[in-house]
Image (tube, grey):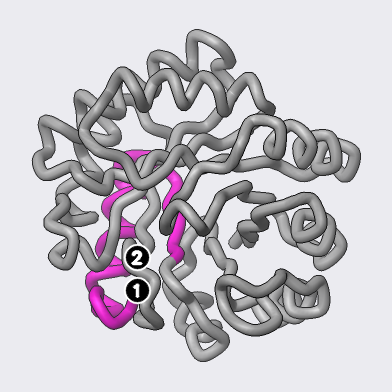
Amino acid sequence: MKVLVSPMNIREAEESIKGGADIIDVKNPAEGSLGANFPWVIREIKEMVAKKGKLLSATLGDLDFKPGTASLAAVGAVFSGADYVKVGLYSIKTQNQVYEMMEKVVRAVKEVNSSVQVVAAGYGDCKRINSISPMEMVEPAYEAGCDGVMVGTALKDGKNLFEFMSKDEVKSFIELAHSFGMFCALAGSLSWQHIELLKKLKPDIIGVRTMVCENGRNSEIKRELVSKLMISLRR
């Protein structure tokens, strides 16, 4: 199980790397759950990440159904150095929309760099934002050529993924992704109380921010907490 940590600036990225995170996921929490950061921030962090032999992920945002806009954003993320490109399917309501959106993003990304991994990201609290359910997005994401799928939460109000999806539903999501040959990531305000459950569920990647911040999502990531998480998951 790889650990993805989501810094929003150079200082936090350095803390994440020194704490031992596997993947550094550049995002901008001020613009939402999967808020996009700026190209120059991604480039600066990429330089640091590459020197340490780590991988870089970049979020494109909590997106509307605008395949052209998403495709352009994806190319920008690739040119900025992303190894993973994550697409938040925020306003996507149907499987056809998932396919059309992700097929265009995959094409745009792979034409520039075929090694970059494309991830379709859904939301466990989909009913609160009227978007497609995580389970329904998996097959069209696969058909569109995505490398992986992820589920998190859209609204950051203290509620976590397991308040919207049961353990069995999350397990089914992971198994469905694996049945199509895609990797699966879990996020959504995961906390220390979820460690043992995550070990049992065995997603390929877990994504965190709040869990390794000093005092809540909008405070700073601390290397000591990242290190504690790495040790706890691999104990």
Single out the residue that lies furthest toward the front: 30
Nearest the viewer among 199 and 33 is 33
Q: Quadrant of the N terminus?
A: bottom right
**Residue 213's quadrant in the figure?**
bottom right
Nearest the camera: 40 or 130?
Answer: 40
Dot 1 lies on which element? Answer: helix
Instruction: Identify the amino acid type marked 2.
Output: Thr
Query: CA–CA distance between discs 1 and 2?
Result: 6 Å
Residue at the top extreme?
111
x and y percent of residue 111 in the render? 49, 9
Residue 103 falls inside the magenta stretch = no
101 up-or-down from 109: above or below = below
Q: Type of residue at label 1?
A: Leu
| Rendering coords of residue 129 (x, y %) | 18, 60
Q: Based on the displayed image, in which of its 4 quarters is residue 99 positioned?
A: top left
Which residue corresponds to mark 1? 161
Q: Which residues are magenta?
A: 161-187
What residue sits right under mark 2 in the picture?
Answer: 153
Q: Is residue 235 visible?
A: no
| Vertical order, 19 against 137 (above or below) | below
Mark 1 or mark 2: name the one nearer the start of the chain: 2
Residue 5 at what x, y percent from top left?
64, 60
The secondary element bearing badge 2 is classed as loop
Residue at 46% across, 33% down: 118
Q: Please give left or right for residue 207 compared with residue 187 in the image.
A: right
Q: Quick check: marks 1 and 2 in contact, CB under 8 Å?
A: yes
Q: Residues within 10 Å of mark 2 (few under 14, many from 20)?
A: many
Q: Where the C terminus falls, by quadrant?
A: bottom right
Which residue lies at the image location 65% right of the left edge and 74% below the top edge? 219
Q: Quadrant of residue 15?
A: bottom right
